[in-house]
Amino acid sequence: MELRVEGLTVARGGVPVLEGLGFSLKAGEVLVLRGPNGSGKTTLLRTLAGLQPPQAGEISLPPETIAYGAHADGLKAQLTVTENLMFWARVYGTGDIDAALSRMNLVSLRDRPAANLSAGQKRRLGLARLLVTGRPIWLLDEPTVSLDTASVGLFADCVRAHVADGGAALIATHIDLGLEAEILDVTPFRADPDAARVQGAFDEAFL
Ligand SMILES: Nc1ncnc2c1ncn2[C@@H]1O[C@H](COP(=O)(O)OP(=O)(O)OP(=O)(O)O)[C@@H](O)[C@H]1O
């Protein structure tokens, strides 16, 4: 399983933010996405996850092979920790949530509604969701926000285990996760801002 990206142009609100991007991510690899704020890391991850179409280029794997961990944790506030994970396990057609609960240190919180979790606990639950997707490619957008040092360690262990098991991960992060990883800096692929001004930027929320 290899994610190959060639000649990719991604856009927000119809305005290209990255152009001509290419990279490959093989089974067993971690790639860390770097670039300044607003450079297009989230836009790239959203495009690879199938949430928006590319403007140009090729993506070798379909979104069905990908689990996307976005900024938001995607939790259902009224459901307990267990119920949230069971919901996702059913969506992805997998069964066992016990490993996910213990690996993200959620066992003692399993009966608590997600609404009553702290920010870091919510994030741990959001990341535990990845473990029940059964999908080989993880795309993660700033996964360690709100996590304490111990939880960052738990999360890094999960990524290590995932890639050791034949998975792969593309992670936008500004911190060092202590993982063996290559760096993909998107800066050289930034689209020309003057070209965007000529086309006229707008907020896609008003489309
Ligand atoms: N809803 C939107 N409509 C229009 N433009 C947007 C929208 N969301 C983001 N953008 C713009 O798209 C560009 C890329 O943003 P993106 O969120 O992909 O960057 P990023 O590298 O992930 O940034 P950060 O490191 O701050 O998270 C930015 O110029 C941003 O202002």
Image: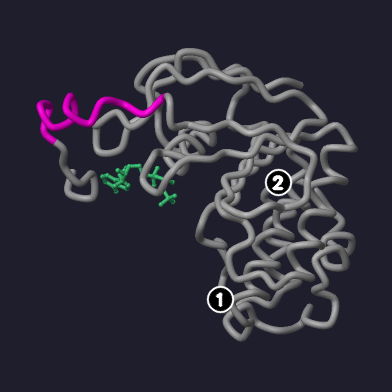
Q: Which mark is residue 150?
A: none
Front-most of residues 36 and 201 = 36
Q: Amino acid at mark 2?
A: Tyr
The magenta stretch spans residue 194: yes
Q: Is residue 118 above or below residue 62?
A: below
Mark 2 residue element: loop
The location of residue 32, given as percent across then percent down, is 63, 39
Up the image or down, 111 lies above or below 91; here it is below
Q: Quadrant of residue 49?
A: top right
Magenta residues, dominant SS class: helix
Residue annotated with mark 2: 92
Q: Is residue 8 magenta?
A: no
Q: Earlier in the sequence, mark 2 or mark 1?
A: 1
Q: Which residue is mark 1?
A: 77
Q: Is residue 99 left or right of residue 195?
A: right
Whole-percent x, y for residue 53 in the image? 40, 28
Find residue 112 and report its horizontal and vertical position in percent: 71, 84
Q: Quadrant of the C terminus?
A: top left
The quarter of the picture where the N terminus appears is top right
Three-letter code, disc 1: Ala
Label 1 residue SS: loop
How far apart are the two marked residues, 2 and 1, measured between alpha carbons?
Answer: 20 Å
Quarter of the figure with residue 137 = top right
Residue sitting at x 78%, y 54%:
156
Q: Is residue 30 above or below residue 1?
A: below
Q: Is residue 82 left or right of residue 113?
A: right
Kindly check if marks 2 and 1 are in contact, taking CB atoms under 8 A apart as contact: no
For disc 1, the neighbor class at 10 Å (few under 14, some 14 to 19, many from 20) is: some
Residue 154 x/y as whole percent: 81, 62
Magenta stretch bounds? 189-200
Residue at 63% of width from left, 32% of height from top?
A: 64
